[in-house]
């Protein structure tokens, strides 16, 4: 490969959330962290070059994007997702969870019902509850190692709870589903039928494995544009989460006005300079790097699957269609949540994301981030094997 994804980059003592805050998060200092969804790889060279140029300038004042920024973002989604966006739709925010919070505040009132599909990315639940909204869950069904949507339950929950807003995770974190066009169409038609707005978190869209295809929610049916907020970002794709820039597309003018008004109410305007330029550089120069990264991640997935089958048959991989996060079914170990957590943290010395934080349906599961050098992934799985062998 042109890019060295096997390189071990020492992130300790850099104020890195993943590596430097174990004690503050209640973990032993010597855990190996594969929890938070950022990567242990240096980003694409074109991004680094632009960030260095910005840093060297020595002036970090208010910054706004020009048309070339929009053109870079628009070209990415046009070329790879057949999605034609308009400049007036674009709202830049410091992150997608921030945007979801703004959408909840703008489109619902205190006490209103907001629906999610657990097990799902846990900040969804937090931002709903912290805004004093009612959380409604239409739980995904795990059938033969594959998660599916229960459409009858989905529609029934909307009707029973007068749901105003649905947060779609596409591709889905943590279960790794990449929803088909037909699945998205059925969800969208139900939401249209009952006047439910949709916030679609598509941050993992650039990581899809062979045999699956990501569909931007509004490309499935143009009618969905009138109820949707599409949330995108370069942060997962190019490891830019700390630079805090997301691109939110809102075709409906009334929804966009409400969103912008709430943005103004919280006092937010421009995203940070280096993040803005890094995003543009990513979409203009980063494709070759990304394609090699995807090959490396596929090999990591193959390595993890093979290791589990040979050494840890009690732990089942839920085969992912997308993302660089894998969802492991540990229920055959027969442990309570507390004992499973003790096994992972104190016996295996691993810092993972326990499935229970994604909702009750996640109990007995663990989420692992495989976006790391293979040597790190191998060590993590060896630690896990050693801990499980002690149980037998």
Image: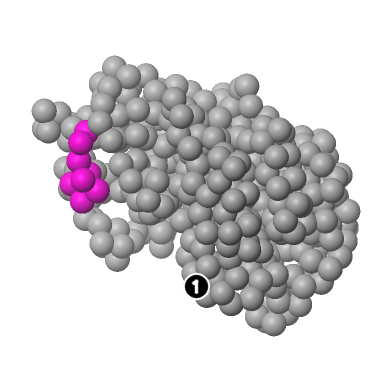
The percent position of residue 134, horizontal first and vertical second, equals 53, 68
Secondary structure found at label 1:
helix
Residue 343 in magenta stretch: no
- Picture quarter with the C terminus: top left
Which quadrant holds residue 309? top left
How would you rate the neighbour count of disc 1 (Cα within 10 Å): few for under 14, some for 14-19, many for 20 or more?
few
Is residue 26 shown above or below 186?
Answer: below
Q: Is most of the magenta stretch helix, strand or loop? A: helix
Residue 336 in magenta stretch: yes
Which of the pair 255/389 is nearer the observer? 255
The percent position of residue 229, horizontal first and vertical second, equals 73, 57
Figure colour scheme: one colour
Which of the pair 114/88 is nearer the observer? 114
Q: Residue at x 86, y 65 (%)?
A: 253
Residue span colored magenta:
333-340
Q: Residue at x 21, y 51 (%)?
A: 338
Identify residue for label 1: 130
Q: Residue at x 54, y 35 (%)?
A: 148
Is residue 242 shown above or below 272?
Answer: above
The percent position of residue 107, horizontal first and vertical second, equals 70, 70
The percent position of residue 99, horizontal first and vertical second, equals 65, 64
Which of the pair 69/344 is nearer the observer? 344
Which quadrant holds residue 162? bottom right
Is residue 368 shown above or below 298?
Answer: below
- Picture quarter with the N terminus: top right
From the viewer's perspective, tell me whether residue 144 is left or right of residue 260.
left
Q: Residue 382: in sight, yes or no?
A: no
Q: Residue at x 46, y 29 (%)?
A: 143
């Amino acid at each position: 490969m042109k890019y060295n994804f096997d390189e071990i980059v020492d992130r300790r003592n850099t104020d890195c959330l993943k590596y430097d805050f174990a004690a503050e998060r209640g973990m032993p200092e010597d855990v190996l962290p594969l929890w938070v969804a950022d990567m242990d790889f240096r980003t694409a060279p074109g991004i680094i070059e632009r960030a260095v140029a910005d840093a060297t300038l020595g002036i970090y004042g208010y910054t706004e994007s020009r048309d070339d920024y929009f053109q870079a973002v628009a070209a990415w989604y046009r070329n790879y997702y057949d999605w034609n966006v308009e400049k007036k739709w674009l709202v830049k925010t410091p992150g997608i969870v921030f945007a979801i919070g703004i959408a909840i505040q703008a489109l619902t009132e205190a006490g209103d019902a907001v629906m999610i599909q657990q097990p799902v990315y846990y900040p969804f639940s937090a931002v709903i509850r912290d805004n004093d909204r009612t959380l409604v869950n239409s739980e995904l069904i795990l059938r033969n190692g594959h998660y599916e949507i229960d459409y009858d339950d989905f529609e029934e929950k909307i009707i029973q709870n007068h749901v105003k807003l649905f947060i779609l995770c596409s591709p889905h974190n943590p279960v790794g589903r990449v929803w088909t066009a037909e699945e998205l169409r059925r969800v969208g038609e139900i939401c249209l039928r009952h006047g439910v707005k949709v916030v679609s978190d598509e941050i993992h869209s650039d990581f899809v494995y062979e045999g699956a295809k990501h569909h931007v929610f509004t490309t499935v049916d143009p009618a969905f544009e009138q109820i949707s907020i599409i949330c995108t970002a370069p942060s997962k794709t190019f490891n830019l989460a700390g630079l805090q820039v997301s691109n939110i597309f809102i075709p409906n003018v009334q929804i966009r006005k409400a969103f912008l008004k709430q943005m103004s109410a919280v006092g937010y305007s421009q995203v940070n300079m280096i993040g803005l330029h890094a995003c543009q550089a990513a979409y203009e120069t980063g494709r070759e790097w990304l394609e090699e990264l995807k090959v490396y991640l596929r090999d990591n997935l193959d390595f993890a699957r093979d290791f589990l089958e040979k050494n840890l048959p009690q732990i089942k991989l839920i085969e992912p269609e997308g993302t660089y996060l894998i969802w492991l079914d540990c229920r055959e170990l027969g442990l309570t949540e507390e004992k499973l957590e003790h096994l992972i943290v104190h016996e295996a010395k691993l810092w993972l994301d326990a499935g229970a934080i994604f909702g009750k349906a996640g109990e007995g599961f663990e989420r692992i981030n495989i976006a790391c050098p293979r040597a790190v992934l191998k060590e993590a799985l060896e630690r896990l094997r050693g801990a499980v062998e002690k149980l037998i």
